[in-house]
């Protein structure tokens, strides 16, 4: 009973924090709320008219939604694995890195779930997936596995974050054994979610562009470029706007590890490019559609070259230790590699896989405005959720928001506590 | 109402749809639609109620006495199809007979059969084929034609990929979709190597005069938006002993439909005596749809 009451205090205090903030916080929140509202209206339109409001058609039956979903699974996976170097190198704020990483995972998976919801024709039939009233067609359906993997991962991370923060709030020492065990489980789980998501594509014999054994490794390696890039930028923002502090060496180490992954990511891309162009079979057409265009069809070519350029430039920046240990260069590199991987995964992976279609027809897919608005709405909701979680978590981690002697102590409201978003 | 409150009725009450249940369902999504079980799990009397409801709704909407069959597979039957590539002239009569027979959406138009025009000197090359050819007269010189629809695979990638088991292979080999169970995730569309699966991107518009009132639950009954559909070998016809519409429409006799298990059938004769091939055999989908050079 006591625990329930305390939990009530915690929720109450958290809402209080969310509802107070400086001008910058409110500008940010209102901007995100506006985007969420716009996404909501666009989604209502899609529900009314059907998925015809997107640019997807039978030829290209998955598009921007599923691309974003795939990218965000990677972000969710990579955010958590930052715990590994933190643990190995004994960085001090390991608890913070765990909390911020797992909160990012919760946010990203929530967005993933929403991207799937907006992509399916009958979201109200979601219960068909629940074993019991419905059926989950495992082991044969990879989407079935993905549903299991992503939901378990969401639950796992949610439990870890809630457990840690709630215990700190009520000034209990979180049981290190319990939470570190869960954290260690979440690391292979992180790899698993991205692997299963890759298998969803690479298991399709109909699509030679995806039917590649190195798709899963590529997914994971590229996620280890974009995920830490996002976390590094967010950590710096938090350092600037909140009381969070991360040691410089930790940042440099993450940047160093990213360099290896960025190099490896480009290597894997080269391996795919070599295989397709050198063997020059009928399957090359997908790669050609991506990098050269086929006939007059070249809508995604500039995007793909931008993606590759971003990744290469970011790698070159990061190769030099002097550069990557300069915050300006570091952030430039992070931004470039983040967008490079984003474009490569959200557009470059899904669209060429389906263009031309299985009977050789080329339908040029470019996301519709409605599709883009819905997607922006989801991403904005993610940013909002993360901002709120950070605002609640940070004062708890710094012992400014806790429950003591029958009374909740709040951080001074309306001051610094804010973070950037997804 | 049965003495034992069924799950559907219970959930219905929970959802506050009791009133709708009393009047027999509201116009769009009713309680029965929403909580309907999978086709394969429905009890015979539940199914009877659903069919009666669906028939009544369609009869009212299209002004034609509609019957929806739920007839199961016939014993000792496994359907197969053979198409003579050398006879096909590319007239697309099969494509339009299929369109008329199966209550397909008119806007956007959905075609279950795609006739591909191929260049003779390139052989079967999908990348170079054209499904939108417009010819004064067919066959066009230097070209041959390849109609492609669902291949009713024995090792069907679409069935494997469906997360909710909304599509499956019937005993007689027909791969069907339960339109009321499909969630519209389009995994099957991505998985099909033959472009045979079609999604209802919008509410399919079926003009009243075009409605075919002779229907099957797993076949040509009008589909809602947001679900996947495909060729069913005209399940409503073939299980009654008729031929599929595409075969009857073919003016050159390129199409042969039959029972693969009938040793004296014409289909078996073709498979045993002609130069038969299947599309994309390297994918090991094991189609029941064969092509041959007669």
Image (cartoon, rainbow, N blue to C red):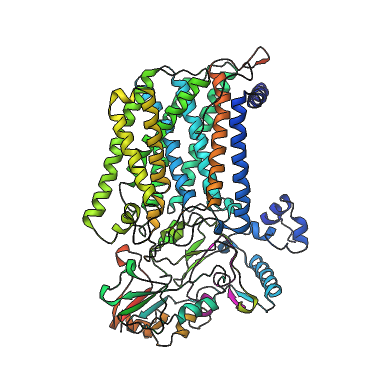
- Given residues A350 and B280, the one toward you in this image is A350
Residue B59 lies in the magenta stretch: no
The spot of residue A42 in percent (x, y) is 60, 49
Q: Which residue is outermost to the bottom? A: B252
Query: Where is A92 relative to A367, above or below?
Result: above
Residue at 25% x, 46% y: name it.
A271
Residue B228 lies in the magenta stretch: yes
Residue B190 figure quarter: bottom left
The spot of residue B127 in percent (x, y) is 33, 66
Q: Which residue is outermost to the left? A: A278
Residue B55 figure quarter: bottom right
Question: Which image quarter holds the N terminus of chain A?
Answer: top right
- Given residues A114 and A354, the one toward you in this image is A354
Q: Main secondary structure of the magenta part?
A: loop
Residue at 49% x, 32% y: name it.
A104
Q: Is residue B244 visible?
A: no
Residue at 53% x, 45% y: name it.
A375
The spot of residue A357 in percent (x, y) is 39, 62
Judged left or right of residue A198, residue A8 is right
Residue at 33% x, 54% y: name it.
A209
Query: Where is B251 relative to A135, above or below?
Result: below
Query: Where is B240 relative to B40, above or below?
Result: below
Residue A345 figure quarter: top left
- Given residues A7 and A86, the one toward you in this image is A86
| Magenta part of the chain | B212-238
């Amino acid at each position: 009973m006591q625990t329930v009451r305390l939990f009530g205090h915690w929720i109450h205090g958290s809402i209080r924090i969310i509802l107070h903030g400086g001008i910058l916080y409110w500008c940010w929140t209102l901007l995100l709320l506006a985007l969420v509202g716009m996404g909501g209206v666009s989604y209502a339109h899609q529900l009314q008219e059907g998925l015809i409001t997107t640019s997807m058609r039978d030829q290209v039956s998955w598009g921007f939604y599923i691309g974003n979903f795939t990218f965000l699974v990677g972000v969710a996976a990579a955010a958590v694995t930052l715990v590994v170097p933190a643990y190995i190198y004994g960085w001090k704020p390991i608890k913070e890195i765990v909390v911020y990483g797992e909160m990012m995972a919760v946010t990203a998976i929530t967005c993933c779930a929403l991207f799937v919801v907006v992509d399916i024709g009958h979201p109200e039939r979601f219960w068909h997936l629940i074993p019991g009233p419905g059926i989950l067609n495992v082991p044969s359906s990879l989407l079935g596995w993905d549903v299991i993997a992503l939901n378990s991962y969401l639950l796992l991370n949610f439990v870890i974050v809630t457990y840690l923060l709630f215990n700190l709030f009520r000034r209990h020492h979180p049981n290190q054994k319990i939470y570190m065990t869960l954290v260690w489980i979440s690391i292979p789980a992180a790899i698993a979610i991205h692997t299963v998501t890759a298998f969803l594509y690479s298991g399709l014999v109909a699509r030679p562009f995806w039917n590649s054994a190195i798709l899963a490794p590529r997914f994971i390696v590229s996620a280890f470029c974009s995920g830490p890039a996002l976390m590094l930028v967010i950590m710096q923002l938090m350092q600037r706007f909140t009381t969070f502090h991360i040691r410089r060496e930790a940042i440099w180490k993450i940047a160093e590890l990213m360099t290896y992954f960025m190099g490896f990511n480009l290597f894997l891309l080269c391996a795919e490019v070599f295989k397709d162009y050198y063997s020059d079979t009928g399957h090359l057409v997908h790669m050609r559609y991506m990098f050269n265009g086929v006939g007059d069809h070249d809508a995604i070519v500039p995007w793909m070259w931008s993606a590759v350029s971003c990744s290469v430039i970011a790698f070159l920046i990061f190769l030099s230790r002097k550069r990557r240990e300069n915050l300006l260069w570091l952030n430039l590199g992070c931004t470039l590699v983040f967008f490079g991987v984003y474009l490569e995964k959200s557009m470059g992976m899904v669209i060429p896989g389906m263009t031309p279609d299985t009977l050789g027809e080329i339908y040029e897919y470019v996301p519709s405005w409605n599709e883009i608005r819905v997607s922006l709405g989801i991403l904005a909701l993610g940013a909002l959720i993360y901002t709120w979680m950070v605002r609640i978590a940070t004062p708890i981690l710094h012992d400014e928001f806790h429950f003591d002697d029958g009374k909740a102590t709040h951080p001074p409201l309306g001051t610094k506590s804010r973070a950037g978003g997804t | 109402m049965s003495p034992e409150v069924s799950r559907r009725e219970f959930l219905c009450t929970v959802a506050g749809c009791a009133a709708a249940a009393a009047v027999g369902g509201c116009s769009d999504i009713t309680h029965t639609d929403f909580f309907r079980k999978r086709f394969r799990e429905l009890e015979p009397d539940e199914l009877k109620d659903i069919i009666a409801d669906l028939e009544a709704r369609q009869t009212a909407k299209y002004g034609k006495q509609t019957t929806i069959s739920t007839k199961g597979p016939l014993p000792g039957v496994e359907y197969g199809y053979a198409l003579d590539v050398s006879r096909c002239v590319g007239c697309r009569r099969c494509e339009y007979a299929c369109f008329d027979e199966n209550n397909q959406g008119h806007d956007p138009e959905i075609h279950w059969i795609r006739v591909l025009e191929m260049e003779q000197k390139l052989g079967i090359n999908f990348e170079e084929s054209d499904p939108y050819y417009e010819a004064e007269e067919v066959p066009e010189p230097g070209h041959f034609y390849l109609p492609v629809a669902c291949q009713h695979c024995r090792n069907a990638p679409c069935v494997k990929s469906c997360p909710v088991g909304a599509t499956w292979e019937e005993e007689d080999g027909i791969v069907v979709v339960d339109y009321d169970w499909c969630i519209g995730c389009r995994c099957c569309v991505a998985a099909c190597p033959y472009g045979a699966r079609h999604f209802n991107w919008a509410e399919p518009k079926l003009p009243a005069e075009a409605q075919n009132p002779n229907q099957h639950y797993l076949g040509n009954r009008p589909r809602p938006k947001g679900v996947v559909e495909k060729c069913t070998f005209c399940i409503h016809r073939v299980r009654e002993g008729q031929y599929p519409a595409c075969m009857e429409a073919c003016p050159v006799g390129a199409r042969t439909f039959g029972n693969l298990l009938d040793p004296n059938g014409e289909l078996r004769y073709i498979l045993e005596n002609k130069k038969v091939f299947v599309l994309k055999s390297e994918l090991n989908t094991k189609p029941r749809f064969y092509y041959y050079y007669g």
